[in-house]
Amino acid sequence: MDPVISIQSLEKTYDNGFEALKKVELEVISGEILALLGPNGAGKTTLISTVCGIVNPTGGKVTVGGYDIIHDYRKTRQMIGLVPQELHTESFETVWATVNFSRGLFGLKPNPEYIEGILKDLSLWDKKDTKIMQLSGGMKRRLLIAKALSHEPTVLFLDEPTAGVDVELRQDMWRVVEKLRQNGVTIILTTHYIEEAEEIADRIAIINNGRIELVERKDELMRKLGRKQLTLELREPLQSIPDNLADFNLELQAEGSRLVYDYDATQSHTGIAGLMQALSEQGIAFKDLATRQSSLEDIFIDLIKESS
Ligand SMILES: Nc1ncnc2c1ncn2[C@@H]1O[C@H](COP(=O)(O)OP(=O)(O)OP(=O)(O)O)[C@@H](O)[C@H]1O
C-alpha cells in the first residue's frame, strides 16, 4: 500500500536545545486512520506541526503525496488540512465568510455547495451568519474543522479533537471523520482518549520522548500484546492461595472471595483447563466467572512504563 506521508529520520531540536523529535520514522498509508498516541510532552504536536509546515525540522525528510514539505511546501500544504487544538481568533467575521476565506487562501475557486455541505455535516449551517466571537466553545471547535476542510484536503490532521467536547460534538466529529474516510481522505489524529483510538483507528503509532516506539495495526497490536483475565467469584473465601495453585499467575482479591487469573490469550495452552482441575482437586468451588480482555489503554500504559 502506498504511503501518502513518508517521514524519515525527522529531528526537531528547539532553540533552547530541547530535542522534541529524535530520528522519527513513520509512513502513513493512503486512506487509513492513524492514531498517534503518547503521554504529555511526547512530541505529538511537534510532529504534526512539522508535517504541516508550521514547525521547521532540524533534520530528516518528510514527503506528502511524494512532495517534499520544504521544497514543495505549497503543494504539500494544499493537500493537508489541520484541525488545531484551539481557535485563537475572536473575529467579527461570520462563519460563512471565514470558511470561504480559508478556502480562498489556497487559491481555489469558490464552491458554495461544498462549503454548505461541510457546515451542514458539522451542524453549523444555522450559524452561518453568526460572528465568530458569538460562537460557543463547542461551535468554535466545529468551525476549526470546517476551516480545515474548506480546501478539500486529502490528508487531515486532528490534534486532540475531542478534548473537552460534549458527547454530541464527539459523535458529529466521528461521523464526519467516517464520511471523509469513505471519500478516501487519510486521517491522522492525536488523542488522550485511548478508547476512541481503539474504536476508530486502523493503525496505532506510539510516540514517547520524541521517538516512535511502535507502529502497528490496531487488531494486530491487541492480538499480540493483549492479555486476558479470568475472574472467579468463590463460594467460600480463601485465606491464601493453596500450594498446588502456586504455579498459576493468581491473585486473591476482595478479602479472599475473588480469584483473578492473568493469562496470555495468544498461547495455545492458556492453562485454564489445568487451573480448573487444580481448583476442583482442592474442592474450591466458584459461583460465577468472567473474562476480560486487556484494552488498548492497558497495553499503552504497559508500553510507556516499559520504555521510560
Ligand atoms: N517552542 C518550544 N520550545 C522549546 N520546547 C518546546 C517548544 N514547543 C514544545 N516544546 C517541548 O517539546 C516537547 C514536545 O511537545 P509537544 O507539544 O510536541 O508534545 P505533545 O506530545 O503534543 O504533548 P501534549 O500531549 O501535552 O499536547 C515538550 O517537552 C515541550 O515542552
Image (cartoon, rainbow, N blue to C red):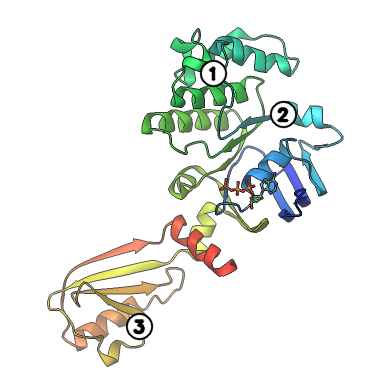
Which numbered disc, 3 or 1, marks the residue that appears first in the sequence? 1
- As displayed, is residue 115 above or below residue 176? above
Q: Which label sits on residue 99?
A: none
* Element carrying mark 3: loop
The residue at the point 60 percent across, 14 percent down is 98
- Check disc 2 and give the amino acid type: Met
User: SS for tag 2?
Assistant: helix
Tell me the SS state at disc 1: helix
Dot 1 alpha-carbon crowd within 10 angstroms: few under 14, some 14 to 19, many 20 or more = many
Whether residue 107 is situated above or below residue 32 in the rendered picture:
above
- Cβ of mark 3 under 8 Å from ligand 1: the answer is no
Looking at the image, is mark 2 or mark 1 earlier in the sequence? 2
Residue lying at 33% horizontally and 62% vertically, measured from the top left? 292
Q: Which residue is drawn at 69% across and 39% down?
A: 49
Residue drawn at 51 percent across, 32 percent down? 178
Counting from the top left corner in percent of width and height, residue 138 is at 44, 26
Tag 1: amino acid:
Ile
Write down the residue under mark 2: 79
Q: In which quarter of the image is residue 246?
A: bottom left
Task: Find disc 1 in the rendering and name its residue.
Answer: 118
> Residue beneath label 3, please?
248
Q: Where does the image place residue 85, in percent across and percent down from the top left? A: 56, 35
Query: Closer to the camera: disc 3 or disc 2?
Result: 2
80 or 90, which is in the foreground? 90
First reached walking from the N terminus: tag 3 or tag 2: 2
Judging depth in this view, the residue of 47 and 227 nearest the camera is 47
Q: Which amino acid does label 3 sit on?
A: Phe
